[in-house]
Image (cartoon, rainbow, N blue to C red):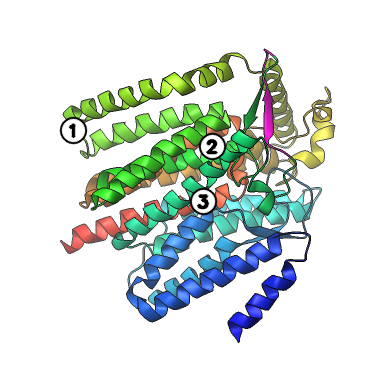
Amino acid sequence: MLWIGALALLLGMAGVASALPAVLALGALAGVTALLLAAIFAPGRLGGLLYFAAVATAAFPLDKYFAYQDHVGGWPGMRVALSDLLMVLLAGLALLGWLLDRPRARLPAALCVPYALLLVQYCGSALGAPHRDLAAFEIAAAVHALAVAAVVAALFRRQYLGAVMAGLSVMVLLHTALAAVQVATGRPIGAGLLRHHADVMQELLETGSVRLRPSGLFDHPIIFADFVMLSLPVLAVGALTLPRRLGRVACAGVLLIGVLGMVLTLSRGAWISSVVTAVVFLSLAVRVRLLELRTLRRVGVAAALVVLLAAIPLGPKIVERFTQSQAGNFEVRVELNRIALSMVEAHPVFGVGLNNFLSVLSAYDPKDVARTFPATVHNIYLLEASEAGIPGLLLFLATGAGLLFWTVRRLPLISDPPLRWLALAVLSGLIGFAVSQLADFSHRLEPLRTFLWTLVGLMVGAVRVGLAKKEQG
């Protein structure tokens, strides 16, 4: 009867103008079916299946905003996503583990203490915000991000490495395949199913040429590029450490496909951040003795060969993007930075109000930048300072720094190489992402923020489990 009712529901939704309700119902039905089959026929793999689904859906933009307002720069309403439904199930398993007194990986105090103080600062900023509802949405987003990391860390297990790689590979392939189709057709194929995109973003160059910038299922090509940038080091770990050769080859193939997708986005920030990520990744691998210098030289030669081969079809596109981009794109970002600094000067303690940059922009915009580019400042650090004050920026930086130093200090102590590789890969991606945010604010945008904090949970879980294995050994 359950399946008959669900089928009737889907048929009824087929007549609705929007496809989103039907997609949501179909996805939920498929998910429930998969979980029931796993519980019946493979109960020992249920945890791994849930973990795979959580990682895969973290970057899947199937969501609903309640009390929605047309706003960019943070949550525009109270968000409920498909990934949240899975997180609730995972949170139930984590709670059950605690009740049964089973050890669970927890988030470090080096992250939680400054983050808790940041939430307090956010509340102070919200009290003086012109639109307190927008501030409340962003506070909810910050709490949600930490909760995601806590649940993912608590349930991490060594045997879930394959599930993590599989979930990540599925998402990279899905988004990149749709991006390639979008470039080939010039139409927002796929994106219109979950978002109401009018067209594929176009970039006008100084030469007068127009280049398409695909976004996969994301709202913007920069979000897609950042997602790939964060995924690449983890896929590299799969190519290096998975026990089966087929899995290693698959991860390597997906990695190369992801690089292609990133190039298609024409996102210079993601390209530069990817280079930073690669340098950090290899440097840390040598420092914690996962790579010897001799091996590093071989890797370098192989990487140089791949780059040279890729440069033949992709090099002109990359050079064109750096040399022929409109100068106005940079100038307007500089103006927004100046506006943000003027907000900080006027409100240094609590800022202009969390998630309220656009709401007060006109009062700090003597050149009327908003008339041609109505956007928030493209620098997450200036955005934090302008909206939550200088203390908010310092606590935001302290949160990232605390997590960074906590992880770096423990990396050499992890005896299990695959776990050490995973923690190192996520850390490298986070450092590259932090660099990208000097010219962007995508940390505030979904589903990238949920995906980012999922990775934080994976990193903390890998470190905790790795250290526990060493103590047991």
Q: Which of 241 and 135 is in front in this view?
A: 241
Which sits earlier in the primary sequence, circle 3 or circle 2?
2
The crowd level at tag 1 (other Cα within 10 Å; few <14, some 14-19, many 20+) is few
Q: SS for tag 1?
A: loop
Q: Which amino acid does label 3 sit on?
A: Phe
Q: What residue type is labelled 2?
A: Ala
Q: Compute the Cα span from label 3 to label 2.
A: 13 Å
Residue named by callout 1: 292
Left or right of 396 on screen, residue 256: left
Q: Residue at x 73, y 66 (%)?
A: 14
Q: Residue at x 42, y 20 (%)?
A: 311
In the displayed structure, 44 sits above or below 81; it is: below
Residue named by callout 3: 451
- Of marks 3 and 2, the one in the foreground: 2
Residue named by callout 2: 225
In the displayed structure, 183 sits above or below 209; it is: below
Q: Residue at x 47, y 69 (%)?
A: 90
Q: Is residue 450 among the parts visible in the rendering? A: yes
The location of residue 51, given as percent across then percent down, is 42, 63
Name the quarter where the C terminus is drawn: bottom left
Left or right of 404 on screen, residue 88: right
Q: What stretch is highlighted in magenta?
A: 199-207
Q: Nearer the viewer, residue 146 or 445?
A: 445
